[in-house]
Image: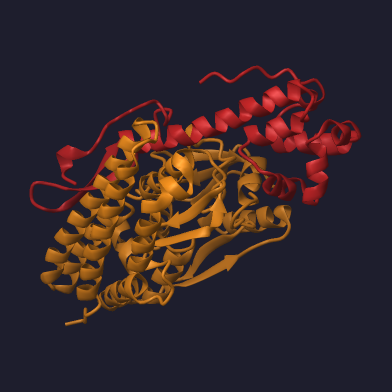
Chain colours: A red, B orange
């Protein structure tokens, strides 16, 4: 890649920081670094990954509203976790976490375990007990 | 926790990639001035691995670099620098050990997860546990962080730092920290460069498992041709997206480190006084450009909402070409000697 070819496709994904340093060839054939604020194919790959996550989160939200899943299932998706990852954060076996994803298991949870979940998701406990999430803005 | 402010005169410089940057910055603190590219080359940072049976965020693992920590270990071994590394079971204990280091004015590298890294742009925060930072002091109860991806010095609270050091998931960091303990009075840079190049050639050509190096690229290309059929259009598109993210995203300096490596070869040519390395550097740059063409084709596939089976073949063709180019490059590089 040449110095003048460094892509600058800013799509606001980087919040104005963490520019990529690109290694490029200058006029003399030497390597120099040039900051880049993004490149369309990379941005597309990243946005595509988020689309999938947003879809899953919305699906989980619907299921919580229909009473099929507990709020923990919603926040699990929202934090891009699966049962395995959530279980290792909370320090419980996977089968127990799986129970908490459904309402019957969820309603039996005591204050302590609820607090631990809320800490992992960085939300207040009330967000779990009184679920009022809205659809995400894209 | 002791709240006393600690300032270490640590020269934070941004780099393309976190581990190179951390290593280069740490070495400079001890008066060893090596560029990011040099660190990358001596530490044999270039690699390729495709491991479809290990999943990260439900997608197969593809890597353009060795395990986190390898670059740092190798460069220190090759220059005769003594280091110490620790990992912990107890988070509080790990923070105590870090505090003790800071009180002795030792800038300390930490392996962390990105997901809870508060200063990182939100769109880039996934559960990825191979990020490296240097903790370089404490101010008003917050830790000063030299993160080579960021332009400026960042800050993390005690709890936030503890949290990222004990991230969970694939390859959990377990509070891993590392630092330099002793610097030799002299070191042989030329020999280190040759060793670094030889190892990379070995890794790219001679690992007898078809998932790694040049063979790994070919394996990926063969699988990719079939993706639209075996995975269906949607999943195939996600798999491709994962590759592009690994190729370009997490600070590779472009084209999965190929450009940094080309920069290293150019520096090596000067250092070793072996001008043929300049030609190889050019070939490596061309190879990197091919990887970028691959990314452009992939970008088109994303745009077309992931249709077009033949595009996957076109992308795979480019991969096959990069594999041949790299095979050729490393066959020549594997014959490098000191004179």
Percent position of residue B112, x then y:
56, 51
Q: Residue at x 67, y 56 (%)?
A: B94
Total number of numbered discs in the rendering: 0
- Foreground pick, B85 / A94: A94
| In this rendering, position of residue B3 left or right of residue B297 | right
Looking at the image, residue B192 lies above or below residue B304? below
What x and y, as percent, mark residue B56?
55, 50
Q: Is residue B45 found left or right of B126 in the rendered image?
A: left
The answer to which of B318 and B125 lies nearer the viewer is B318
Residue at image x 71%, y 45%?
A83
Which quadrant holds residue A59?
top right
Q: Quadrant of residue B176?
A: bottom right
Q: Quadrant of the C terminus of chain B?
A: bottom left
Q: Is residue A108 left or right of residue A138?
A: right
Q: Nearer the viewer, residue B177 or B129?
A: B129
Q: Residue at x 62, y 25 (%)?
A: A58
| Rendered location of residue B84, percent (x, y) | 55, 69
Instruction: Evaluate whether residue B297 shows in this view.
Output: yes
Residue furthest front in the image? B229
Taking the spot 80% from the left edge, 52% from the top edge, the residue there is: A93
Above or below — where is A70 with respect to A135?
A: below
Q: Position of residue B91 (x, y in %)?
A: 71, 53
Whether residue A122 is visible, yes or no, is no
Q: Is residue B285 above or below residue B307?
A: below
Viewer-closest of B155 and B202: B202
């Amino acid at each position: 890649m040449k110095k003048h070819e460094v892509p600058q496709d800013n799509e606001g994904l980087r919040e104005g920081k963490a520019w990529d340093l690109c290694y490029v060839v200058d006029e003399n054939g030497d390597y120099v670094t040039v900051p880049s604020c993004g490149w369309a194919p990379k941005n597309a790959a990243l946005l595509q990954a988020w689309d999938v996550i947003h879809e899953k989160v919305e699906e989980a939200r619907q299921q919580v509203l229909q009473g099929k899943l507990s709020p923990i299932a919603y926040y699990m998706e929202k934090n891009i976790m699966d049962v395995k990852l959530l279980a290792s954060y909370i320090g419980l076996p996977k089968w127990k976490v799986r129970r908490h994803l459904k309402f019957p298991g969820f309603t039996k949870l005591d204050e302590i375990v609820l607090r631990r979940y809320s800490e992992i998701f960085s939300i207040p406990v009330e967000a779990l007990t009184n679920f009022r999430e809205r659809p995400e803005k894209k | 926790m002791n709240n006393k402010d600690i300032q270490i005169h640590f020269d934070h410089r941004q780099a393309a990639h976190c581990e190179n940057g951390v290593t280069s910055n740490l070495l400079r603190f001890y008066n060893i001035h090596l560029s990011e590219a040099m660190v990358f080359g001596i530490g044999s940072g270039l690699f390729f691995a495709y491991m479809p049976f290990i999943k990260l965020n439900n997608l197969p693992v593809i890597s353009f670099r060795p395990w986190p920590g390898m670059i740092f270990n190798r460069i220190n071994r090759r220059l005769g620098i003594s280091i110490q590394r620790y990992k912990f079971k107890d988070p509080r204990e790990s923070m105590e050990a870090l505090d003790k280091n800071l009180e002795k004015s030792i800038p300390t590298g930490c392996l962390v997860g990105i997901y809870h890294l508060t200063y990182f742009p939100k769109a880039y925060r996934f559960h990825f546990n191979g990020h490296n930072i240097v903790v370089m002091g404490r101010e008003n109860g917050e830790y000063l962080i030299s993160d080579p991806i960021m332009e400026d010095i960042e800050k993390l609270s005690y709890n936030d730092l503890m949290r990222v050091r004990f991230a969970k998931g694939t390859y959990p960091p377990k509070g891993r920290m590392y630092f330099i303990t002793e610097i030799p009075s002299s070191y042989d840079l030329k020999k280190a460069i040759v060793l670094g190049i030889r190892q990379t050639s070995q890794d790219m050509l001679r690992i007898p498992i078809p998932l790694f190096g040049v063979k790994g690229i070919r394996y990926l290309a063969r699988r990719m041709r079939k993706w639209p059929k075996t995975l269906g259009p949607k999943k195939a598109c996600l798999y491709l997206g994962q590759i592009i993210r690994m190729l370009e995203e997490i600070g590779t300096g472009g084209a999965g480190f190929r450009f940094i490596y080309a920069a290293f070869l150019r520096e090596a040519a000067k250092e070793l006084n072996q001008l043929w390395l300049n030609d190889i550097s050019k070939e490596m740059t061309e190879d990197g450009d091919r990887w970028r063409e691959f990314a452009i084709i992939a970008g088109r596939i994303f745009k077309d909402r992931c249709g077009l089976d033949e595009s996957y073949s076109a992308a795979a063709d480019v991969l096959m070409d990069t594999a041949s180019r790299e095979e050729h490059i490393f066959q020549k590089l594997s014959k490098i000697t000191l004179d």
